[in-house]
Amino acid sequence: MSDAGLVTEKLPADPVEVAPEHDLMSKFDALIAERQALIDTGVTDPFAIVMEQVKSPTEAVIAGKDTILLGTYNYMGMTFDADVIQAGKDALDQFGSGTNGSRMLNGTFRDHIEVEDALRDFYDVSGAIVFSTGYMANLGMISTLAGKGEYVILDADSHASIYDGCKQGNAEIVRFRHNDVADLDKRLGRLPKDAGKLVILEGVYSMLGDIAPLKEMVAVAKKHGAMVLSDEAHSMGFYGPNGRGVYEDQGCEADVDFIIGTFSKSVGTVGGFCVSNHPKFEAIRLACRPYIFTASLPPSVVATAATSIRKLKHAHKKRAQLWDNARSLHGGLKALGFQLGTENPDSAIIAIILDDQERAVAMWQALLDGGLYVNMARPPATPAGTFLLRCSLCAEHTPAQIATVLKMFEAAGRSLGVIG
Amino acid sequence: MSDRQAIYDTVTAQIEPFNKKGVTLSDATTFQGDLEWDSLTVMDFVAAIEDEFEIIITMNMQAEIETVGQLVDAVAKLKG
């Protein structure tokens, strides 16, 4: 009789170490060392900021200090809107805190339908599908629309979610130079005439805040028989007569087949969506894995989104204020001598270009210590290996706040020798 | 001169402006390891090759190409 089962099993006192070549985490050693080197210089880690309190769309407490927020995507300042908050509270009371299921099964509640109706009204389209995040909207739409043997043609500076959507699908992927109409034309011309093609564009490119020449690009795409998807994440609410985005502003509504958007920017909560007039659009719900195999948004989130979208449709005053703020900040920074991502205030994002990481971090730290939060961005997120301090404006920023912000930039820029 | 040799000569001529380290080129030269190109350089170089031969090298194909020889073979196939 064996007594093996009676011997108490023990973990070895000295566990065998995983050999470096077998430790899957070893590949991150360079990344860990780079981050440590940055922190060892004594700066606050730019990628570990905590907002201890949020007082309004433009003010928070960071490390115990009152701080102006100039690096969120809260363009229309809807996060503290009384109607939006009330809608969320009511939904929490009536429907509970979560859905516990996929949209396809038990995860569709009244307000998921309501927010899709609000989107149809806002965009004046026949179809709207809500995803759990904007990232998943791109992931799902791109990987589902373009199949094997078909082509996705994307701008080289596309957002990570667009690249990841390409990777998740089975289509052939072709890049063209950022915002280069002639390059897009040339590359489309070399593809097989009979193959299905999807050209992916963005209204506003979020790193530098530059806008796409959508009218020309959409015309080229149509000339080659391609369908067009435009990501309008950073333009919703304040471009075009109805605030639909850059594509509306440039008059391409009839030729853009799919619009991708998000609730996490102008709408002020979280979630993503695609809208379209395509007669077969609803079929996406039956085929799109990032739509099917994940939990739907909580009822409070879709209720706040629906209320916010309906208010955004008529938010003409906020729109005007946001553009005023963008012009003031852009003009002020330019006059101070900073190198900016765009010649004109084309969007609500204003990027200050710096040559190296040390200077970017020092400037960012000086601003934070003075009570101003901006985004720091570095390669590979940024184009052409640049380091950026990115400011994004809110309709709720006051002229007094913009004046304060400009003083802070002037002081930090001069003391660090970024401006003369 | 064979077609492959002609393509090899054109490809290596296109590499030169990006060959900052002055690496001696052969079929076995790798873009990432030997030439130490970053993703931006790769993008510019691929665009130059595409325009030179009037072809499209999709990102799916680029992922499979590691050496100069593999690129030459891919160009030959795409031109064919």
Image (cartoon, helix red, strand yellow):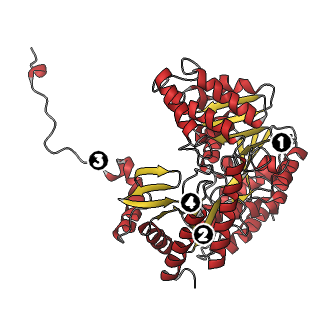
Q: Which residue is rendered at x = 86% and y = 40% of the image?
A: A254
Q: Where residue A141 sits: x, y (%)?
A: 68, 35
Q: Does residue A376 sit above or below A277 in this rendering?
A: below
The chain to which mark 1 is attached is A
Instruction: Return the disc, 2 or 4, that comes first in the chain's sequence.
Output: 2
Same chain under badges 2 and 4? The reply is yes
Q: Nearer the viewer, residue A143 or A257?
A: A257
Q: Are marks 1 and 3 on the same chain?
A: yes
**Residue type marked 2:** Ile
Location of mark 4 (residue): A380
* Amino acid type for the residue under numbered disc 1: Glu
Give the percent coordinates (x, y) of residue A218.
Answer: 84, 48
Are there few (<14), some (14-19), or many (20+) residues within 10 Å of tag 1?
Answer: some
How much space separates mark 1 and mark 3, taking CA atoms?
A: 57 Å
Q: Find residue A23 and report its horizontal and vertical position in percent.
A: 35, 48
Q: CA distance from mark 2 to mark 4?
A: 17 Å
Mark carried by residue A352: 2
